Amino acid sequence: MPLILFAAPALWPDYQDALPAALAEAGIAGATLVTEAAPETVDYIVYAPASPLQDFTPYTRTKAVLNLWAGVERIVGNPTLTQPLTRMVDPGLTEGMVEWVVGHALRHHLGMDRHIVNPGHVWDPTCPPLARERPVTILGVGALGSACATALRALNFPVTGWSRTPKPGCLHGEAGLRQALSTAQILVTLLPKTPETGNLLNADRLALLPEGAVILNPGRGPLIDDDALLAALDRGHIGHATLDVFRVEPLPQDHPYWTHPRVTVTPHIAADTRALTASRVVAENIRRGEAGEPFLHLVDRARGY
């Protein structure tokens, strides 16, 4: 049976019971799960980017590195990593993302802030439009973006998806991006961090959004040009930005996002990997590796995700 190195020591307390249970459930009850091992004995590495393990060269027997995070930008460029790398696509993470996106979309769609924070006791009976009259665009239609689109469509929001590469049922490319932005009263950014997506939302593209548009970014901080966004918020062209991810985390105390009246900061909580459901994903990939089947959620090194 395989030897599995859990190389994410900070997360071990969360997984020390959940992962053995998931392995047993997957029929790998005889696997050896350790937090330290001689590299040449390791069959699988369960990994997180903050791990002290950075040199994969001696792990000559290892069949796969199984990342516990959805994002792989901090490991995919490691030149010593020649083993297959998988990313985490966790049902619990997906559910959390859907709840965050839908919750904040409804908050802005319904104008809830003006009733929750109303120190002047203003009686304003203005009703919001129906969801079917509020176009939403999602940039990034992978597992998370597709799940969010399904949930929003179930509430009758018209949803446009955009992908960097052609995919059925969504726009793509620069022309498609301009079209997708031009109708987005609510914009959700769920693209991975790659060289191509850095500052994707720059001043020119932010200007394509309808006046008063709302931006929800639970994807990656570097997708947005911060200075351009602040300028668009100051002008009132962007009505509000709810941001969960940032270039530097924790967000520095003196960052203007904290005090801007049109910005909501949430501390990278939109989607968290849940040990119970993530352990089942890890166990399934180990089962596949032992059976000679293709791994789930294999990272494309050339694309970076």
Image (cartoon, rainbow, N blue to C red):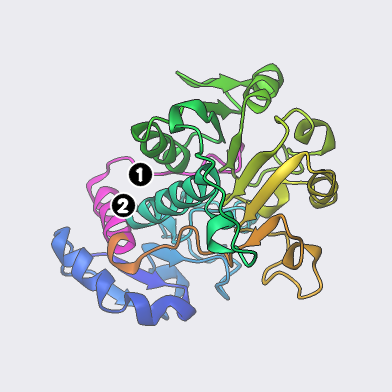
Image quadrant occupied by the N terminus: bottom left
Say which of 128 and 123 sits in front.
123
Please name the residue that numbered disc 1 is placed on.
296
Near mark 2 (Cα within 10 A), the count class, few <14, some 14-19 or many ≥20, is: many
Q: Is mark 1 on a helix, strand or loop?
A: loop
Q: Residue, x 71% and y 31% (percent of image)?
A: 209
- Whether residues under marks 1 and 2 lie with C-beta atoms below 8 angstroms apart, the answer is yes
Q: What residue type is labelled 1?
A: Leu
Q: Residues within 10 Å of mark 1 (few under 14, many from 20)?
A: some
- The answer to whether residue 159 shows anywhere in this view is no
Residue in the foreground of this view, choosing between 97 and 164: 97
- Is 24 on the left or on the right of 132, as rendered? left
Residue under label 2: 285
Q: Which amino acid does label 2 sit on?
A: Asn
Residue 271 position in % (x across, y down): 46, 58
Residue 118, picture quadrant: bottom right
Position of residue 254 measured from the top left corner of the image (x, y, whole percent): 81, 73
**How far is disc 1 from disc 2 in space, using C-alphas?**
6 Å
Where in the figure is residue 139, as x and y percent of width and height? 58, 35
Q: In which quarter of the image is residue 267?
A: bottom right
Q: What is the x, y in percent for residue 285? A: 31, 52
Give the mark nearest the N terminus, 1 or 2: 2
Q: Give the range drawn in magenta.
A: 278-305
Left or right side of 244 for 153? left
| Residue positioned 19% across, 70% down in the render | 21
Residue 66: assigned label: none
Q: Nearer the viewer, residue 15 or 59?
A: 15
